[in-house]
Image (tube, grey):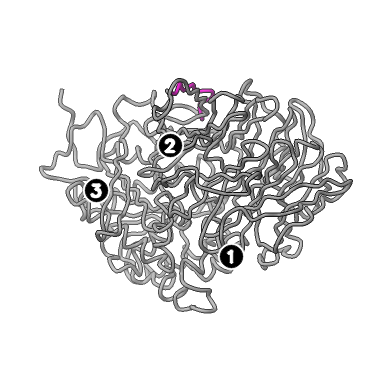
Amino acid sequence: MPGKTAPYGTWESPITAKIIMGDSVTFTDVLLDPVSLVNYRIEARPSGRCALVNTTNNKDVVSDDKWDVQTQVHDYGGAAAIVYDKTAYFSNNTDNRVYSVKEGGTPQAITPEDTKKYHRFANFAVSPQDQSRIVAILEDHANDPNGDDPQNVINTLYVINTTRPTRQPTQVKGLPGLPDFYSCPCFNTDGTKLAWLQWYFPDMPWEGSELWVADVEYSADSLTVVNPKLVSGEKLNISVAYPVWADAVTLIFTNDSSGFINPWKYSTITGKAQAILSTPIDEDFAPPAWPLGYSPYAVVRDTTLGLFTAFRAGANVLYYIDYGAEQPQALEIESPFASVAAVRANKPGQPQFIFQSEQSAEVGGIIQCILSGGSGSVAPTPTYTVLKTEGESLTDKFPPGIVSLPIAETFHISPEIPLYALLYKPVNPDYSGSSIPGEKPPCIINVHGGPTSLCVPTLDWVKQYYTSRGWAWLDVNYGGSSGYGREYIALLATQWGIKDVSDCFFAAQSLANDIDTARVTIRGASSGGYTSLAAISFGPNNTFYKASTSYSGVADLALLAKLTHKFELKYMNKLLGGSYEEIPKVYDEDRSPIFNAKFITAPLLLISGALDEVVPPEQSAKIKKAVTDAGHIADSIVFPDEGHHINSAKNKITALEGERTWYEKYVIKPKA
């Protein structure tokens, strides 16, 4: 039977905020013990704490709720734990100390008490030669106790001696230069060499960084690197990342000198670094290194085989590469996954892997991938097994065919400049379309955060919440987004608040055959919220949008620059063209929504947390007053118990229902 008809945006849907915003567990990392080959995961629990879990038996390594396996290094965290020879080492977010524990045991502190929580640890590397030595990043905030002077925060590599838990860790000796940041320390398989990344202001790690390798000398109290060698990378111009030792002499890493992030290798025997593929692939084999510990590929011990991820049209594809072949080829592996991360090789000598995955129509989880067959230019065949599902699969709660699948769109602003987006059309098996002849659906433009990030085509029930009600949803990967090469990221340099805004408008206009361009809304959170506010305030087409929602959107760029942490201390200089002292007008009148709120005519909903220190709630109140004083419409939802992000299920439900009601009132009802 043909489905019902009703105006777009008014369809009844079984996808409710209460169902999709319930308390759930998400996976933040997958770990592998290289000795026992047991795999683990880090779970983010509804309470906000993170737990280390054995994926084989699904038991918490530490069951007491007082333990929180997280770190605040770089403020984005990541790489909070490692498991080596059946012992886990982790940073405890509660007290910033590092602990060791055997499964089911009681954690033992291996760093001294830090009552003022000045010291943050992450990115642990256990020496195979002396397991009592762990190299890690130490981020020292002693010279910035109140967070007012992030330039005084010190990041370096330290050695934790597990046999002397009351002794302060000692700095790795012999490190070259005076970089502002370190990441990814890793020992080769016999513990005789150490590799690491370092970079300097004003770079973010994906703009310019250096990969170093050195010999290691052990002493009673410390560890010294000798004969340090710059392997690859260049300040400002070439980014290198994600080093992994394949054996005692071969280091695999990524390098973007071709314009795209591609796999490289380095031999300590020849002293030569080179691209693995003779012809670079115009795809990024990794994302920007925002959090620590990301693992976009894995190599199999005792072989020259590896499983690599790359981005294509915003989604991940899988490549199988024999990097030891005379002419290595990237053989694409069949994959149902839209996103693959935390890749680990879990069987020496065999192409067997585990990773974290997400799909476009189903919930994600931890997957085992076994490759078989294949030779020469013929790719092996994968067998995928779900080891653990991430949270509850909601698809069984809803009728078949209700999920709207993403459509990758490429527009051309000019013949040389593309623009990428993901379109989700209205889908509901109970409806065949609109009851209004010729009607096109209203559209929600969603702006990702970062801004050096991207929207990926994975299942997000918030999108389905709207598409099942007759809305179109458009994720815009504007110029400056990651996953499309170095030049595409560079399009946002000096242009934040301009390029992202114009690209959102261009994408909507380019879809005039698919959406009702007279009924377009724009939304975003944090830096995405900044773009949405910019689009309706000082943007040249600010009256185009019929409503907007900002989740903790950045409204005052000068205040953001003042409050930022060390990791992003120079980030805005590149995005805007200079520091606040150099170009105050750009930060204030030209590109801060709070200075241009009087120009906002689109009904604006501001959703924020009263405890937000990044975008203080006073900013939302100021914008709301300016809009209403000008005779236009604005309202706010402020959660007294939330900060910069809305975390509790109850508040997420309130926010989502409030946002939908806002659009129905100011976008749908006038049309219907």
Q: CA distance from mark 2 to mark 1?
A: 38 Å
Q: CA distance from mark 3 to mark 2?
A: 42 Å
The mark found on residue 330 in the picture is 2
Q: Which residues are magenta?
A: 382-390
User: Circle 3 — which element?
Assistant: loop
Residue type at mark 1? Leu
Q: Are marks 3 and 1 in contact (CB under 8 Å)?
A: no
> Picture coordinates of residue 388 (x, y %)?
53, 25
Any magenta on residue 385?
Answer: yes
- Residue 192 seen from this side: yes
Identify the mark nearer the N-term, 3 or 2: 2
Pointer 1 residue:
569
126 or 473: nearer the eye?
126
Q: CA distance from mark 3 to mark 1?
A: 39 Å
- Judged by depth in the image, the label closer to the viewer, 3 or 2, is 2
Residue type at mark 3? Pro
The mark found on residue 442 in the picture is 3
503 or 662: nearer the eye?
503
Q: Is residue 399 left or right of residue 327?
A: left
